[in-house]
Amino acid sequence: MRSMRLKNVLVALTLSVIAGSVFGQDTTTKKPEPSKIKPYGDVITAKAISKQGLFAVHKVEEKYYFEIPDSLLQRELLSTSRLVKVPAGSMKYGGEIVNAKTISFEKGFSNNIFIRVVTLVAVADSSNAIAKAVRNATVDPIVMVFDIKARGKDNKSTVIEVTDFFQKDNNISGFDPDSKKAMRLGGVTADKSYILSVNSYPINIETRTIKTFSVSAGGSQAAEGQATPDPAGGASVGVTLELSNSIMLMPAKPMQSRYFDPRVGYFADNYKVFSDDQQKVEDKTFIVRFRMEPKAEDMAKYKRGELVEPKEPIVYYVDPATPKQWRPFIIAGINDWNSAFEKAGFKNAIVGKEWPENDTTMSLEDARYKVVRYFPSEAKNAYGPNIHDPRSGEILQSYVGWYHNIMRLLHDMYFVQMAATDPRARSMKFSDQLMGSLIRSAVSHEIGHTLGLRHNMGASSQTPVEKLRDKKWVEAHGHTASIMDYARFNYVAQPEDNISDKGIMPRIGEYDKWAIQWGYRYTTTTPEEDKKIAAKLILDSLKANPRLWWASEPDSYENPLDPRTQTEDIGDNSIKASEYGIKNLKIVMSNVLDWTREENDVYENTMDMYDKIGGQYHTYIKHVLANVGGTYETLKSVEQSGDIYTIVPKEIQKNAISFLNKEVFQTPSWLLDKNVLNKYRKPVRNEWPQKIQEMTLNSIMGLGRLYRMTTQNMRYGNEAYSVDEMLTDLNKGLWSELKTGQQIDSYRRFIQKKYVEFSLHLLKVSAKKLNPDYDISNTDIPVALTNQLDNIRKSCLAAVPNYKDALTIAHLKYIADKIEKGLKINGNDSNEF
């Protein structure tokens, strides 16, 4: 289908202004004099060093020229810039992409060539009358102008000089403005910047440059240790970086796109579609994926359902900087995805390989090659970006960024979650086999992102908690249905369950195989027919297997609205799962001194792992907290029965409060082992239990949660868990000693005071309407808080005769007095409000 495009006019105007000063040129509207076109031999002389490829590239002394075939004018090209080498201490690393734009070269008005940035926003079929309106609104920003130096020998190409284009600073071959700002870079210093090489390949041109930047205000995090004061005047010496730029030819015919469906977790792109028969403008939203097609000679086999090899497999190379012991595990993590592609009808669809270090024809900076890049960084991270064709969603470039210190993250998480059940985890340095297995899973996750898959934080919630302890079942099915979940390890498994790696480690699961089948199956139908086929596959599959459910990342990592879509959780019941997790944490805590012991260690290992234990404990608490005031969101089409939004059943919410009363507000003494704490920290600050108690109470009584519960109560009536019911259940635990006469320890006194403090603060917020986003003044919240506080005041006074300890008696009287003043009972004035 031929089409006309509607572009972003505002972007066009802005970039056109930028273009005028991209090399520091005058931006006044003075019409340039036409340049004089010289004979080809006068420009590309006998001294020229020429390389053939996408464009012929010529080097004449210290100048570089592109010879652009007329056939490639107005063809869309993907320009990508990435770092090659960076100074020590940089916030970015060699291999990272710092710019990507779709551009085109075209003949200008006066012996020159323009570069435009292509900004696709909308299309209209050229057979429609509305296409004329779309055409009239079309403009792509001209961001650069080059004089034509010569025409090619056969008069079918144009020669332009590109020395300044690559050597100087601009937002096409250099940094994206946001990346440049993040690294706090100023302008390029011309006498300290130069071109290393320009190479031309069949579909791309690769340029390497050295650029020295000044440092903008505030210094440069990008070059800590290099940007030093200039003794001559106090100015910064600057930051020197090695950059590569790739100009890649985009497909002449875009790949057929697959319409996006929010029930399958793919990254997506979109543009507007205009047509004569519309009554509203439509969005065309399509998924991001690699082009995966059968070979022509295998098409009949593919249609019969036989597995065939794709025309172009997806090949990932392992960075030669990667330590050799990890390379087989990284390759295995890449190849693991073949089981998923087989569901889409392809075998050997994805291949992991070691980089051929002796092949001088290949370059790590050549954008045609997909690489798992190894970054020498202290960051505990990895990521898998991709760059795609905005017309179709076809992934054109991708890589995995693998930070060296992610191994520390993998170690610590496996230690705290699995040391109770896996003896291999009971040390500060794992065997190569164990660490390699952890790396393999993490690489598979990142490769999934490069294939177009988003996180599936709901996958693990589709596994019953009981099955996580069923050795036969969990080893056959895995503890989560998706490697794209943040469901690290099976922390529900108990030591006596004897579950192997198959039931502990994340791996390619049922959802992943289905998602690849849905996104990568090949079809020759129209996009509209394909959309119907894809929708039917979703309906049939979800009906047959609920484990294929996809749910996006939570609205907030601290307080998600749907408790099934949390990070780092597993199982369909976060309360039971957290109980099992805490049981295992208690085992780790009781052995932490032995399991962290290393020669000459001054208890730094113990300190680190104790903090990780406390953090994991807090994670379990947050999993449970999310149920209180939670709402389930299950995306459905009109063909599916049931509601999209339902509230978490009241009984589950009540159980969550009961869990918190038991595991948090009853002092968790297992975390207060003096034999551990006395080894590394003075008693001068709050311990983990105290911090977690305060954070948990603050979350329970957060305005957002209470307001949400109130709106649920208004919609669902008694089916919902009201604020007053929740506070009543909470206070039964927080103030349980008042009825039993048990000793109130210092941790309990602390959290009881905090409850009163938080409650009175909420009343103050209500009375003065201090939070316009959550105006609770006319809700039942102030009424419930006042009622609960008054009951606590009366209970404290009634309990005083049951105690003989002076401090406890003083504590109860203090609470009663604070509430009385706060509520202004009996005319007792207070400045609280």
Image (spheres, grey):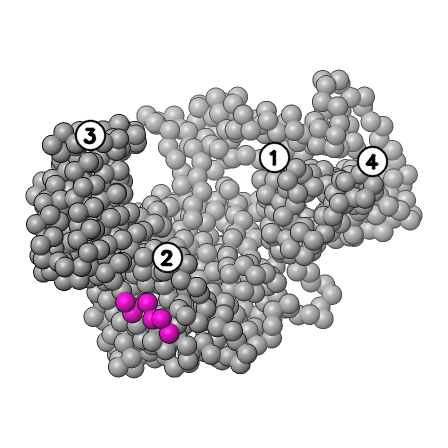
Mark 2, residue position = 686
Residue 107 can be seen, yes or no: no
- Which of disc 4 and disc 3 is earlier in sequence? 4
Q: What stretch is highlighted in magenta?
A: 669-675
Name the front one of labels 4 and 1: 1
Residue 642 placed where, x, y %? 16, 47
The amino acid at mark 3 is Asp
* Quadrant where the image shows the C terminus: top left
Residue at x 64% of width, y 55% of height: 89
Q: Can residue 26 be seen in this view?
A: yes
Q: Judging from the image, what secondary structure is the residue with disc 3 in?
A: loop
* Label 2 vs label 4, nearer the camera: 2
Indicate the amino acid at tag 1: Val
Which residue type does callout 2 highlight? Asn
Q: Where is mark 3, residue-wise?
A: 829
Q: Distance between the residues labelled 1 and 2?
A: 55 Å
Q: Distance between the residues labelled 3 and 4?
A: 90 Å
Mark 1 neighbour class, 10 Å CA radius: few under 14, some 14 to 19, many 20 or more: many
